[in-house]
């Protein structure tokens, strides 16, 4: 009976301190882990937003450039930002421009819609037109910024295409 | 006997705390390590996308140089790295290494060998292989970061004036 009461005597102060310290260490470790996981997920979202918008815009421009016959230089702003690129392929005129921080696609003068997401801002859109002895090439430089809740990411993407319609 | 049993029980409890804390510690350490891997892999995917666009652009730049003057490509040494020089007015090749947004880009050229009768591209060691003087095998390599990572894209460009 005395043994039973000794068993139920509770914890000593030292025991309590040790247990509470261990618990605290574990809790702090777990909280830190979850916090950095959250930060990582938010940063991932920033990187993904940038590459997604850049991919959509560059792929669309690339396909229009490869299909085009000539660059309508009169209706384009080349070499500077914000740039405007107007391409002619048969009866279709395709225009890429910058408005409200987004790349806008227009066909035959009608706005089709934005190519970059509302979650990123296009800081710089530059088209450089090279006229060679046989063909023409357009280089696109696209700088995007994503202001996330934990960080700000900026990346510049480049793409060049030879106008397949410019082969004689 | 009873007294001894009680002591054994108490000893086990302390051991449990130590074991429990160790397990929790190991889990936290692995979780932190996994997060580190997760961070670098996400960044890697974004870097690789950027690098692939540069490599793809490299192939188009080589095509454009070919379109302008086949000899500009044909005259370059084989196997050595060559670089693009992009000015506001022209795209040319240079011996000065090119760096774009922290990515290094170069291209190499190799001869193309074809089967004498079918014109299929074959290895230079294949019997009956004939060197095609009107084609070059172009490899564009983009490398970045530390430890270095790289992507490479290849194509065959031909002399369109021939």
Image (spheres, coloured by chain):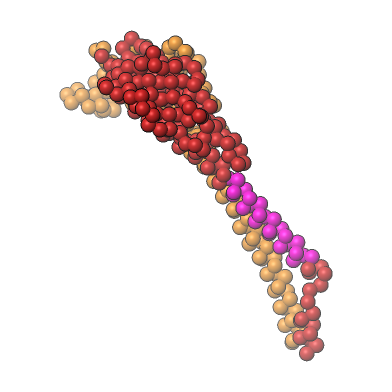
Chain colours: A red, B orange
Magenta residues: mostly which secondary structure?
Answer: helix
Q: Nearer the viewer, residue A167 or B125?
A: A167
Q: At 26% from the left edge and 12% from the top edge, which residue is drawn?
A: B161
Coordinates of residue A168 in the picture (x, y in percent): 25, 14
In the picture as drawn, the residue positioned furthest to the front comes out as A110
State whether residue B50 appears in this view: yes
Q: Quadrant of the N terminus of chain B?
A: bottom right
| In-image side of B35 versus B56 (left or right) | right
In the picture as drawn, the residue positioned furthest to the bottom comes out as A1
Q: Nearer the viewer, residue A94 or B94?
A: A94
Q: At 72% from the left edge and 82% from the top edge, which residue is drawn?
A: B5
Quadrant housing residue A61: top left
State whether residue B80 appears in this view: no
Query: Is residue A154 within the magenta segment?
Result: no
Query: Is residue A39 within the magenta segment?
Result: yes
Quadrant housing residue A104: top left
Coordinates of residue B24 in the picture (x, y in percent): 64, 60
**Magenta residues?**
A17-40
Q: At 66% from the left edge and 52% from the top edge, which residue is drawn?
A: A32
Coordinates of residue B67 in the picture (x, y in percent): 32, 15
Q: Nearer the viewer, residue B2 or B44?
A: B44
Q: Nearer the viewer, residue B125 or A23?
A: A23
Task: Identify whether B16 is placed above or below B71.
Answer: below
Q: Quadrant of the C terminus of chain B?
A: top left
Coordinates of residue A19 in the picture (x, y in percent): 74, 66
Q: At 57% from the left edge and 34% from the top edge, which residue is drawn?
A: A153
| In-image side of B145 versus A87 (left or right) | right
């Amino acid at each position: 009976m005395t043994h039973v009461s000794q068993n139920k005597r509770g914890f000593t102060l030292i025991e309590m301190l040790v247990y509470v310290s261990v618990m605290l260490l574990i809790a702090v470790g777990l909280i830190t882990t979850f916090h950095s996981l959250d930060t990582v997920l938010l940063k991932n979202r920033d990187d993904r937003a940038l590459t997604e918008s850049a991919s959509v815009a560059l792929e669309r421009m690339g396909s229009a450039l490869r299909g085009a016959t000539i660059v309508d230089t009169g209706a384009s702003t080349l070499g500077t930002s914000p740039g405007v690129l107007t391409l002619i392929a048969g009866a279709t005129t395709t225009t890429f421009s910058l408005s409200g921080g987004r790349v806008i696609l227009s066909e035959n003068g009608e706005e089709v819609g934005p190519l970059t997401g509302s979650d990123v801002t296009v800081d710089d859109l530059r088209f450089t037109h090279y006229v060679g002895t046989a063909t023409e090439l357009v280089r696109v430089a696209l700088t995007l910024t994503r202001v996330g809740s934990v960080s700000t990411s900026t990346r510049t993407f480049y793409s060049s295409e030879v106008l397949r319609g410019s082969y004689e | 006997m009873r007294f001894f049993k009680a002591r054994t029980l108490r000893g086990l409890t302390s051991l449990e705390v130590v074991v429990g804390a160790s397990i929790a510690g190991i889990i936290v350490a692995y979780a932190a390590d996994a997060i580190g891997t997760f961070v670098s892999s996400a960044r890697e995917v974004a870097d690789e996308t950027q690098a692939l666009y540069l490599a793809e652009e490299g192939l188009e730049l080589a095509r454009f140089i070919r379109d302008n003057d086949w000899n500009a490509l044909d005259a370059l040494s084989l196997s050595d790295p060559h670089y693009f020089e992009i000015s506001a007015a022209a795209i040319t090749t240079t011996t000065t290494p090119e760096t774009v947004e922290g990515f290094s880009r170069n291209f190499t050229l190799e001869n193309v060998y074809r089967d004498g009768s079918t014109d299929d591209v074959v290895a230079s060691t294949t019997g009956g292989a004939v060197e095609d003087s009107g084609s070059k095998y172009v490899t564009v390599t983009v490398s970045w970061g530390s430890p270095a990572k790289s992507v490479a894209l290849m194509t065959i460009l031909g002399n369109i004036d021939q």
